[in-house]
Amino acid sequence: MLGGLPERHGGGRLMAPQLLARSRAEAPARAGDAAPRRWATGGWWITAALLLSLALTVRGLAGADADWRVALGRLITAHGLPATEPFSYQPTPHPWVAQGWLLDVLLSRLWALGGAGLTMVVMGAAGTAALLLAALAVRRAERVPGLLVAGATLVSAIVAAPQLGVTGATITALGAAVCLLLLTRWREGATRAIWLLPAVVLVWANLDPGFVAGLGLVALGGLTVAVRRRLDPGSEVGAELRPLSAALVLALAATLATPAGVHVWSSLGENLAGAGLGVTAWQSPGFHTWPMRLLEVEAVGMVVLWALSGRLDPLDAVLGLAALAVTLGFAGAAPILAVVALPQLAHSASAAITRHGPAVQRALGHGGVVLRRPPPRPRALPAVALAVAAAAALVAVAPRLTASRTAADLAASEPVAAADYVAAHLAGDRLYSSVEWGGYLALRFPTGRLVGAYGPPAATGATAQQRALDVHQLKADWQRLLEQDGVTHAVLPQDAREVAALEEVGWLPLCHDAAARAVVLAAGPRPAADAPVPDATRAPACTG
Amino acid sequence: MPVTGPVRDPDFWWHLRTGQLILDGHSLLGTDPYTYTAMGHVWVMHEWLTEVLFAVLHAAGGLALIVIVLSAVTWLGLVFVVQRARLMRPHNATVALGLLLAVVAGYPIWGPRAQMITFALTCLVLLLVERHLRGGGRAVWALVPLFLVWSNLHSGFIIGAAFLVLIIAAEAIAGRLGIPGAAPADRVRRLAWVAGACLAVVVINPNGPGIYLYPFQTQGSAAQQALILEWQSPDFHMSELLPFGFMLLSLGAMVATNRRLTPRDAVLALATTALALQSVRHVALFIAACTPLWIQQVELTRTRLQAWWTLRGRRGRRWTAPPARLLALTSLPVLLCLGLVATTRLAAAATTREDSTYYAKMFPVCAASWLERGPGGLRIFNQYGEGGYLASRLGPHGDRVFIFGDAALMGDALLLEAGSVESVIPGWEQTLRDSGTQLVLFDRDTALDHALLASPHWRLVYQDGLSDAFVPATAEGLALAYQLPPQPALPSSSPCSADFRSATAAAG
């Protein structure tokens, strides 16, 4: 797959700014001579960056959607698509919409084949593939050095990685990268490429509701090109709007070819309800964390490089600002921004170096020798970088995939021991839990509707999520909601406010899961005013 | 109009009370007089002069005079912004548009509060620096006395100092690199001397050189950044913050398209963007630094579009401006109307009484009145944002609060303890017991309120439209409940009535 990449990026031109400036001017005459070496070294740098990206995109299952998706996938494989949401005990079961049924099935198959390790690797590879496709979307005519593409890939990997892993966001990033690549190729004149869009959207719509982002990306791109052509008839000569419009219409029609049919669109609104339900991915980003600070750096860097490059492409500006605006509203869109920004960072940086490199060199004391050839770079450097990146990726990823490590990680992030206790002692009882742990409990107790809310709002419905949020926030009717649901037991993080509130009204800790810092509680009689409040962490250890 | 309004800042009240205590005692307060949890903590009074000014104004003209003066200070800041923008000679309509956007974008921040002093002074510093770098002269030395006063008014002087250093560094580097738009080297050198003098004089304050550390302690406090709302990143789901988002994105787009900005504008835009995205309170700094740049970029865009339109030969029917006299005649009524509305708004804000329904809905006015009738010397657990008001009202009564709004004085440990109780994290009751809390006064319909209502270990002793008060269901707590005044019997239309919330909900 990497075969054609370095040539497109002018891969071997890993040189100081002054030489880059000269080689750009002389490019037509020299392109043939230097092509093979460029082809090789540029590809090595990019491959090294992708390997390092893999180390970032292969992520553990903590906080991921894996558990409930695997549970759903098993259910679909065994019994077909359910009519109503199958796991939770809500009073009126929520009609189930097949938003990501194919991903559920794929994940359950992967899990069955190779456990958590294989699932993590495949989804990590999908995340890295998104970055590769975004790197391929660097405009070919720009002849961007491979080292710059590699740098942009790494920056985007660091920004996107926290949102990726065994989650639908990985599919969104991958789909967005495919759409970006198709749009770029279409604009360059490869009209046939855009006919892949309906097929891509067909698969994507069955995998994840994020397909809307891809359609938006292509529509926005087409609109920008159309407006530009209208304002400046001599521009955008390679892009044919009719095929793009037709492909978009077909892609829209393809979104209906899911088991959910037209409901796949109406259920998107339910996803948006996540913003009001405190789902982190649907909130504005908090720039106090390092991943979000890096996102800020990438976004600001993109705008600065636009200005420094001296020739801002309107499509870049529209897509970049749209992705930035969406990410400022929804932190979960960070991978889309990373994918959109990657090619822009690479070719804007290249143009900026070409434009300002000589002046910088002059100012730093190298005036008069602007075209001087820099000291020779060791030819083996890219190969060494690739070897180091491969070793680093191996060292970073391999230990995380062993069965013992994944089991230990799972026990630390999910209430495994607490669920063992419930299975042994409280079989068939309804469990109140946090939304984060609801998915694991659904995997452990898939029959009998024993768990509360889990996953995004579309999984169990906004009503169930709101009820869970009301109990979590101790709203006025929190006790009544638990009573209505017939809940007599709870599996909760030991520092959750519900633990404190439930103990106040007489619930008693049954056991303590030290690995996951979880407690299992059971309803009890209302205590006397002078009765001491129990300490959940002193309860006996949870065992099966 | 938007910069005028009644007091919304919860810290205002303890600033006012502190100023009164300084005037009464003729000296700064070495330690915290308000809490029972941070009594021994040494107080770095970085706003002592502001607090004294509040007290003097309050003595002279009550709350009204403070509201009028602080509104005028904010308004002056905006005047400085306009003056700086006009140095670039934009069209008046562009300036008006930029000012309008700036005022709307800063809406969540405006209001009578000490931070507005830093906003106005930042705008003034940037105006003086811009004038100097464009035209030279000695007026820039006015920055030295300005910084001397500023460091006694508010620790935000560090922002002004940081801007000076950034501007000097950017201009010096740009001059060295020969980047177009860089200021002449001699003016940058003079500015560097002025900045050095400013950095030297700021130590002339009661805290000495220690004042330099204070802002960094605040910025570096993980607890403050996590728990205090205005230190958190902007939430763009709030409609009030959308204008700021628009300003930010449109500025980025225009800068990238026009590719014309001075090095100092570039560093200021980058620095204030980072600050504003980190903490919503810094949106004011973004407005102070970037509004003139936004206006300049709109002007450049307008000029480019005009040139492009002309180039395409689509002149059509040319628009001609109406005669100046006609314009003035039609503008006058509009300006009069706007002036009337602004004056009315200012008058309404200034005449809002402290015991009014407006304040009673925002601060525990009724609960404080109730507690003033009870035994003094109580130790009260309170909401972080209400500590200042309670300290101001109940301090003279001898009561002390758990926490109030000087987060640096409180310390991270106490902030986290208060946060864990507010969030009902396991161990919250132990924290209250260990601190010797006798009464919990907290907003209704919060997690802690509902936990206390549900618990058999606590007893509700008071309720109004805003707050509930609880005592422990122990012998000591019940004895205290016996000494407290009874729940006042008031009509449900009064915000001090327990039924006020349900009556309000039923009414509308």
Image: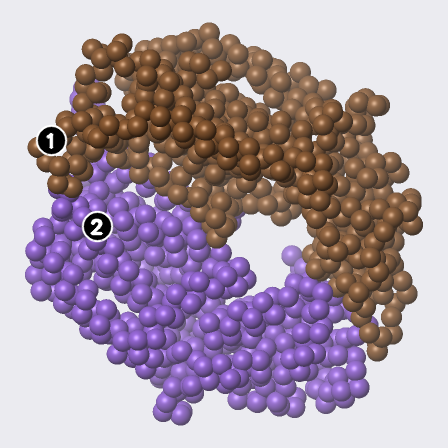
Instruction: Say which of B137 and B13 sits in front.
Output: B137
Q: Position of residue B479 (x, y in %)?
A: 76, 88
The crowd level at tag 2 (other Cα within 10 Å; few <14, some 14-19, many 20+) is: many
Instruction: Confirm whether residue B366 shows in the render.
Output: no
Q: Is residue A346 left or right of residue A131?
A: left
Q: Look at the image and tell me in which quarter the C terminus of chain B lies.
A: bottom right
Q: Position of residue B10 (x, y in %)?
A: 49, 70
Q: Look at the image and tell me in which quarter the N terminus of chain B lies.
A: bottom left
What's the residue at 57%, 16% (across, down)?
A: A200
Amino acid of disc 2: Ala
Q: Does A513 appear above or below A239? A: below
Q: Does A63 appear above or below B125? A: above
Q: Position of residue A409 (x, y in %)?
A: 68, 44
Amino acid of disc 1: Val
Residue holding disc 2: B170
Q: Quick one: which residue is furthest to the bottom in this view?
A: B25
The crowd level at tag 1 (other Cα within 10 Å; few <14, some 14-19, many 20+) is: few
Chain B, chosen colour in render: purple
Instruction: Confirm whether residue B508 shows in the render.
Output: yes
Circle 1 sits in a helix, a strand or a loop, which is it? loop
- Mark 2 chain: B
Q: Quick one: which residue is furthest to the top in this view?
A: A192
Q: Which chain is brown?
A: A
Locate residue A190: give its quadrant: top left
Query: Which label number is shown at residue A369?
Result: 1
| Marks 1/2: CA–CA distance | 26 Å
